[in-house]
């Protein structure tokens, strides 16, 4: 299992993971973080690549395993 430091998640990416875990949509995350929906989706794609996952459900499961949530 990879550690958080090995994955290289940024503080903003971790924030987006945690907001996703609250059940917020990309639009809701964008409004809360003062980002565009496109930027939130770009962050999510970068998170997926770093975590080797393909969707939000997998991202949240892996984040739980890593202790992010």
Image: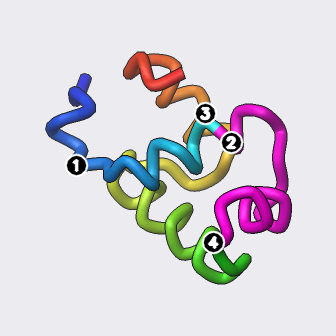
Question: Where does the image place residue 13, in percent across and percent down from the top left?
Answer: 45, 53
* Comparing labels 3 and 1, the label whose residue is closer to the camera: 1
Secondary structure at numbered mark 4: helix
* Comparing labels 4 and 2, the label whose residue is closer to the camera: 2
Q: CA distance from mark 1 to mark 4?
A: 18 Å
| Sequence-earlier tag: 3 or 4 | 4
Q: Name the residue tied to disc 2.
A: 19
Q: Is residue 41 above or below residue 66?
A: below
Residue 8's disc is 1
Quadrant the N terminus occupies: top left
| Sequence-earlier tag: 3 or 1 | 1
Question: Where does the image place residue 10, in percent across and percent down from the top left?
Answer: 32, 52
The answer to which of 51 and 12 lies nearer the viewer is: 12
Q: Are marks 3 and 4 in contact (CB under 8 Å)?
A: no
Q: Is residue 58 above or below residue 27?
A: above
| Sequence-earlier tag: 1 or 4 | 1
Q: CA distance from mark 4 to mark 2?
A: 13 Å
Quadrant the C terminus occupies: top right
- Residue drawn at (60%, 33%) of the image: 60
- Residue drawn at (46%, 43%) of the image: 14
Q: Which residues are magenta?
A: 19-34
Secondary structure at numbered mark 2: helix
Q: CA distance from mark 3 to mark 1?
A: 16 Å
Q: Name the residue tied to disc 4.
A: 41
* Comparing labels 2 and 1, the label whose residue is closer to the camera: 2
Q: Are marks 3 and 1 in contact (CB under 8 Å)?
A: no
Question: Badge 4: how crowded within 10 Å, few (<14), some, or many (20+)?
Answer: some
Q: Name the residue tied to disc 3.
A: 60
Secondary structure at numbered mark 3: helix
Question: Where does the image place residue 38, in percent across and percent down from the top left?
Answer: 66, 82
Q: CA distance from mark 3 to mark 4?
A: 15 Å
Q: Say left or right for 17 vs 26.
A: left
């Amino acid at each position: 299992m990879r550690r958080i430091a090995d994955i290289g998640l940024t503080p903003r990416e971790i924030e987006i993971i945690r907001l996703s875990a609250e059940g917020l949509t990309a639009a809701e995350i964008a409004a809360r973080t003062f980002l565009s929906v496109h930027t939130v989706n770009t962050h999510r794609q970068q998170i997926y690549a770093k975590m080797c996952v393909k969707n939000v459900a997998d991202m949240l499961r892996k984040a739980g395993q890593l202790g992010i949530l």
